[in-house]
Amino acid sequence: MQLLFKPRDAAYLGSGDLPFGKFEDTSLWEPITTNLEKGAEMFPDKAMFKVGDRDGNVVESYTYAETNAWANRVANGLAQGFGINKGDKVGMYMLNCSEHVISIIAIHKCGGVQVPVNKDEKGERLAYVINYSDMRALIIDEGSIPFIEEIGDSLEHLEVIFVTVDSPPETIGGIKALPFSEFNSYDDTNPGVDVTTSDMERCMFTSGTTGMPKGVARDHGGVIMTVRSYLQQQGIRSDDVLMSILSLGHANAQVMCLFSAMAAGGTAVFFPRFSASNFWKWAAGCDATCVNMLGAVAEYLWAAPESEWDQKHNIRILLGSPAPRNLKEFQERFGVRVIDGYGSTEMGMVLWKDPEDHRPGSSGFPMEGYYVELRNPEDIDAVVRPFWDSTDDITPPDDAKGLLFVKPLVPHTTLNEYFKDERRTREAFDDEGFFNSDDLFARGIDGRYYFVGRFSRIRVSGENVDPVAVGDEAMQYPAIQEAIAVGIRLPNVSDDEIKLCVTLKAGEEFDPIEFSKWMAERVIVAMVPRFIEVYEDGFPVTATQKVKVAEIKEITDNTWDRNETGLKFSARK
């Protein structure tokens, strides 16, 4: 299939060229690491990636030749030394670091399937991901050791753990442990494993509706699909420096920083944490030209005190999902062009705004390789026909809103399966091959799509969170009888907040602070509710005994707000 690579206005293009082409002919697509191998020959001394420390200093830098050679040693070590064959699962559970970058590339090269584990998973959920994925090897940093020790007795398939320190314990949770430097003795030539774009590339676990995460299996073609769109829409070229403060355990940092830099012959820079007050200073220090945001990052940047670094940087374009609500003021203050878009773990980037399009509020147009339509949430066989003119009224009428259904047009570019879950995989697509995104949009007669909200899922701090999973976890607390979690969108904030609505068992007392601490020990930080309300007389219900969801979403005088107590939980840093 031939895909059009749309031209960009020169104002939105980086300098340099695209040494490996525009990826227009899908029949010629190869796994992304072939571009690294070509780059190692064409420009061996050019920086491929850099890593910063917690204070924003760039402390490591690796050329294309060094990156390729190191990744080859790890890939050959996994295959020859530890029997990792094509299709075997290899996990990564760590903060952003050079070993994380190399592990991703090496797993590609040896034909393995990467299983990125959210750095904030712990306990039962962490054990579930490791076991359910059939992971044979796991690569971790030193800070992850206690979390693996805690669940070691429950791990079923894991054979070896590699740790990014020189002298790890001999075993972790009873499983053999070795230093990551164990790979240094292996050959640094390209492994030559026959990997194609139709082979599985990742099994990434995202929020599940049964309480545990579900594994989203994607093929190598999905990487190329999103990368080509990123190069096109963001105007990426070989002189660009792509910076990420997002976790390499997420697709955004991998695909739209590491892999996009690799495809353009550019450079990627990773920091292990986000700092709103130092963001632009760090960007200037690493010469970044492009960066991505998720969730409420834009709000945090806007709320930070004004600084000399606000425009003392080289970032020209920024992908925001979503873009900040005060878009014009944000762009003027920081001197950047912000582009909105929409994507998902299952489908990749489906909608993208053109940088030349300055009409605010939309997520843009469908990308090539996808066909999309809106359907009535009450009757998903009924397609919502566009009639709303967004130039007259920016607020869409209810009749213009619908669930976004996505039909992939290029094989091996979107969800391959929900790992080991045939039923869920069948249910994910209808008979015509459309995927239900579970997100509400409105479409204008101009063809632009406008995000309205989540239908059943919610998004907290850039993480997709299933409210059913939050409620199920909360009901494990001894005092709680029933629990319903709902998402609340506060004014001028792009992300959701969780409100947990509970009823209590007879005679039980409930301390929301103690409950929150209990919850934080069991789940990722994004699943710990900000708001809690106890319904002493039961949840409000309709005449047919259905819970009045709109009513329990209200913030009342009886709603406890964790922010007012000063109780905070931090993601692992």
Image (cartoon, grey):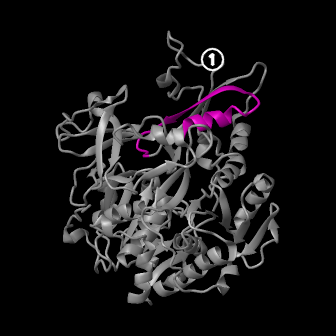
What residue do we see at 78% from left, 57% from top? 152
For the N terminus, the quadrant is bottom left
Q: Is residue 100 magenta?
A: no
Give the magenta range.
466-494
Which one is nearer the viewer's eye here, 198 or 559?
A: 198
Q: Position of residue 20 (x, y in %)?
A: 32, 77
Q: Position of residue 154 (x, y in %)?
A: 78, 51
What residue do we see at 54% from left, 13% from top? 545
367 relative position to 343: left or right: left
Task: Examine the rendered structure and indicate whether residue 37 appears above or below residue 148.
Answer: below
Which one is nearer the viewer's eye here, 519 or 304?
A: 519
Where does label 1 land, which residue? 538
Q: Is residue 489 visible?
A: no
Image quadrant assignment for residue 18: bottom left
Task: Examine the rendered structure and indicate whether residue 236 appears above or below residue 488.
Answer: below
Task: Examine the rendered structure and indicate whether residue 46 appears above or below residue 261.
Answer: below
Q: How many marks?
A: 1
Task: Examine the rendered structure and indicate whether residue 224 appears above or below residue 570.
Answer: below
Residue type pointed to by label 1? Gly
Q: Position of residue 461 (x, y in %)?
A: 52, 50
SS class, disc 1: loop
39 relative position to 368: left or right: right
Most distant residue in the top direction: 543
Q: Position of residue 388 (x, y in %)?
A: 20, 35
Q: Is residue 487 magenta?
A: yes
Image quadrant assignment for residue 44: bottom left
Image quadrant assignment for residue 367: bottom left
What residue do we see at 56% from left, 43% from top? 421
The crowding category of the residue bearing disc 1, from other C-alpha atoms within 10 Å (few below 14, some 14 to 19, many at least 20), is few
120 relative position to 156: left or right: left
